Amino acid sequence: MKIRRTGIDYVDKTLGRLYDGLSILVASDSFTLNDAERLAGLICLNFMKGGGAVITVHTNLPFDKVSKEIKNSYSDENNVAFQKAVREGRFYYLDLVSGENRLNANYNNFKNVRGIANDPNRIVYEINVAKNQIKQEFPETPIIVVYLNVSSSIVDFDPKTVLKMIRKLTIDTKREGDIFLGVANRDIHELQVTNTLNHVVDYSVNFGFETIDDKKQSYVYTSRTPLVREAHKVLNQRFAYFFTRDNFITIFPLYYSFDELKESMSFSELGQVSVLGWNHIITPIQTLLLFLETLKKLHSHEEYQRILYDLGLHVGIGAANLIGSERGINNKKLFEEVLKYNTVAGWGRLLSIEGSIDEGRLKIAGISTIALSYSRSDHPVCAFVAGGLAGILQVATKKEWKGRETKCIAKGDDHCEFELELK
């Protein structure tokens, strides 16, 4: 059995061939360390869902808390996959927590869980023992060795000893066609140590943050990758990101689009704000939500949804005509430009597009500001957005489209999803 991807799109676009063996470093600062560890957790859970095995070396979390952490942080599907791997013997846990916590932990209640001495030679030995046991029971199963947290061991020992250990672990996993996955905190040690770690591994994912208007914005970027392929799209480029309960999603930056929007804005002494030659009113989202709630009280659910859809359809047509005439574009490019305009105007963010305009069928995933701001609902609330997308496509293709929302953040889904097809 060969597992050829992690299931995390951002990582898989630049990883290369997993089945040939690979070493990965997920580096962070203290502010984003939890995010780095969560990404590593998602990679391991996806690996176990595919039938792979995981050996975890942890420096600060007793195993009796692991199941609780997974249940609270990840989806039910991931939790089931984890429990299945534990029962089958595809999961080993090497516990390097402090002596006091180790004395309080009862390892007899868990299969393949060991409290071990915090010693580099002992760690390598125990990893090899676990590998051999997995290979005996599952000869063709690939293994991830995940080390949480490399920096804690660097604090406990001198950096040279730990770097030598990490180098050995990466060489072993690559030789055997497995994966080494280490998590490190840049704030704990000198820059030279982090740089050495980066050069020891094949692939490095870096988390960090910057302060914008007194708010901390987390980001992720790739600093090292074994293959070119699609790497040029993400290498050394910062992406905002967020986690769902079963995925890690990056968001392409749109700074230049804001600059374009600002250049097209003008203000009159009468209080009018003009963008691309059209007057705009900037208003809090609560104003729109109040309008929606008032409209909802006056109509049945079906009529309410129809009104919003039709309104969105005409707004989408108007926006597409505006952008098309102003920029002199049409077809697919027009669709992309209007979505970009709506993003910087505050309607939400596009996450992915599946399907093809030429084939007459699209599935669009995104974050709708309406759904994000809406109170919890038992039905989708973005009929206006669905209509707007259909209207944009109508202008772009000169054909009629119909759209519907199939997932909605207001319902508790991780993102909103819209299916659109030619009538």
Image: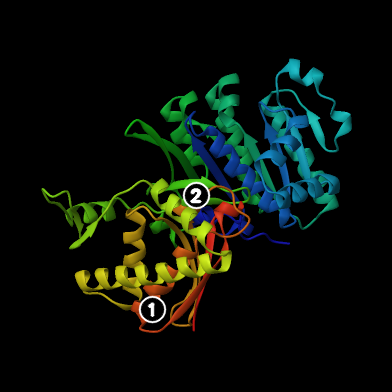
Q: Nearer the viewer, residue 251 or 84?
A: 251
> Residue at 52% of width from left, 43% of height from top?
201
Q: Residue 229: which disc?
A: none
Q: Is residue 71 above or below residue 256?
A: above
Residue 69: quadrant of the picture: top right
Badge 1 crowding class, 10 Å Cα cut-off, few under 14, some 14 to 19, many 20 or more, is many
Residue at mark 2: 372
Residue at mark 1: 394
In-image side of 122 versus 346 (left or right):
right
Instruction: Farthest residue to the top: give it.
Output: 100
Return the disc, 2 or 1, that comes first in the chain's sequence: 2
Q: Is residue 160 above or below residue 296?
A: above
Residue 131 location (% of width, % of height): 76, 44
Residue 342: quadrant of the picture: bottom left
Kind of element beneath mark 2: helix
User: What amino acid is at disc 1?
Assistant: Gln
- Give the Cα separation between the discs numbered 2 and 1: 26 Å
In-image side of 113 versus 293 (left or right):
right
Quarter in which the N terminus is drawn = bottom right
Instruction: Farthest residue to the left: give it.
Output: 269
Whether residue 82 is visible: yes
In-image side of 111 versus 161 (left or right):
right
